[in-house]
């Protein structure tokens, strides 16, 4: 535990009759960019506020660097929080907002000036120290908030949906900026968001939360390509979920009967399967390819119901009987695809993921 930046064990938090967190456990390593991801109201912000010391759990423990922080105030925890509404003092200029934490720590004034100048340059605000927050754009204000958190050289930074108030282009710019700033430090970032793009593009690891339960944890690529349950499959990007039945299991190969015919798939590790079990076959739209499958692939025929050009891709709606499926195909290299066509399609065995049928996944 001493080598772990954050260790959370069996956190339970209730608000009257509502259980916001139901036995949540996870750890964050030093220097890791760790995401808490889930829809609005799932409990992710409550978890972040517990880490910050702004909420007290009903049960469970939180440790920073191997030490229990239950009795520590937010200030004593040394984990500054970046709020989505900026929380800047409007009467203080940029320099004083950023240096406030250093003043509270009684750092000599000369050192404060040097550290503030350095962090302002690193976040792209060099020369703006005398401006008031009201004279800055939203993106610039968010940079001030990041600078204020980083200037005290913490081992942990907590970020509560920091990009939610920015427009699409600024969000993309600030995502890149946060990634760069994190790579330049050995600070553990815990980042709360409901935005899958932010999590998938930035996270080293992430925890997916649904109705107060931690239902998936791992690297973004693992959770996206091998989701452990229906919620993770459906929440992390687009997914075709096909009703299926297990017909046989041969090692890691799971044979299933789908509306498109017999397929072979794989699944997240640690799961067991039985013949006759009702499951879901998940395929991402970008994994569906025109043509007959090569080896280790699942071929099927389907009626093309609709084709839409989306710039670099074609979005294709397919149907077989009462079952629909979507494919995303590169428009530049696609063979002609027309509405009403009965066409051959395929998806690889590795991209065919077998998922348990449970509507509500249990906590991990």
Image (cartoon, rainbow, N blue to C red):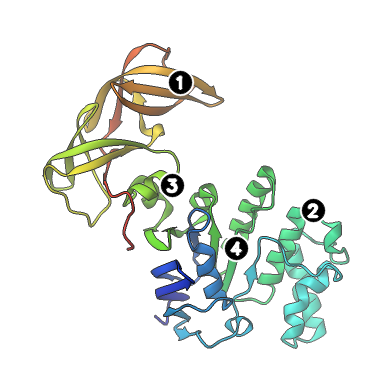
Give the residue pinned by disc 4: 160
Label number found at residue 333: 1
**Tag 4 near tag 2, CB within 8 Å:** no
Cα separation between marks 3 and 1 = 29 Å
Cα separation between marks 4 and 2 = 19 Å
Image spot of residue 184 (x, y percent): 60, 64
Image spot of residue 317 (x, y percent): 41, 23
- Quarter of the image containing the N terminus? bottom left
**Tag 2 near tag 1, CB within 8 Å:** no
| Picture residue at 75% right of the left edge, 58% below the top | 124
N-terminal label among 4 and 2: 2
Q: Circle 3 sits in a helix, a strand or a loop, which is it?
A: helix
- Quarter of the image containing the C terminus? bottom left
Instruction: Give the foreground label among 3 and 2.
Output: 3
Label 3 packing within 10 angstroms: few (<14), some (14-19), many (20+) = some
Vertical placement of 182 versus 354: above or below?
A: below
Label number found at residue 235: 3
Give the residue pinned by disc 2: 137
């Amino acid at each position: 535990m001493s080598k772990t930046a954050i260790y959370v064990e069996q956190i339970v938090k209730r608000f009257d009759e509502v259980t916001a967190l139901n036995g949540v456990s996870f750890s964050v390593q030093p220097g890791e960019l760790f995401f808490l991801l889930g829809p609005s109201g799932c409990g992710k912000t409550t978890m972040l506020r517990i880490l910050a010391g702004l909420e007290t759990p009903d049960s469970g423990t939180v440790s920073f660097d191997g030490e229990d922080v239950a009795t520590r105030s937010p200030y004593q925890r040394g984990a500054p929080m970046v709020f989505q509404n900026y929380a800047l003092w409007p009467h203080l200029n940029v320099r004083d907002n950023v240096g406030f934490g250093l003043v509270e720590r009684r750092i000599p004034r000369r050192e404060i000036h040097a550290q503030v100048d350095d962090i302002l340059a690193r976040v792209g605000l060099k020369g703006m120290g005398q401006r008031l927050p009201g004279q800055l754009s939203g993106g610039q204000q968010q940079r001030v908030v990041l600078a204020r958190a980083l200037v005290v050289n913490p081992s942990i930074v907590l970020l509560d949906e920091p990009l939610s108030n920015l427009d699409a282009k600024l969000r993309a710019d600030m995502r890149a900026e946060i990634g760069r700033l994190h790579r330049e430090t050995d600070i553990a970032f815990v980042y709360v968001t409901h935005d899958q793009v932010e999590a998938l593009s930035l996270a080293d690891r992430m925890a997916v939360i649904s109705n107060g339960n931690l239902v998936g944890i791992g690297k973004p690529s693992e959770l996206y390509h091998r989701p452990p349950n229906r919620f993770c499959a459906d929440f992390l990007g687009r997914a075709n979920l096909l009703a299926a039945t297990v017909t046989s299991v041969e090692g890691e190969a799971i044979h299933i009967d789908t509306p498109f015919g017999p397929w072979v798939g794989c699944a997240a590790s640690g799961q067991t399967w039985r013949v006759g079990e009702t499951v879901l076959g998940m395929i991402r739209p970008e994994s569906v390819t025109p043509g007959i499958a090569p080896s280790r692939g699942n071929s099927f025929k389907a009626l093309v119901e609709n084709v839409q050009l989306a710039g670099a891709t074609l979005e294709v709606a397919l149907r077989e009987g009462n079952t629909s499926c979507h494919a995303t195909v590169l428009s530049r290299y696609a063979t002609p695809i027309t509405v009403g066509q009965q066409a051959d399609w395929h998806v690889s065995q590795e991209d065919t993921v077998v998922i348990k049928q449970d509507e509500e996944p249990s906590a991990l």
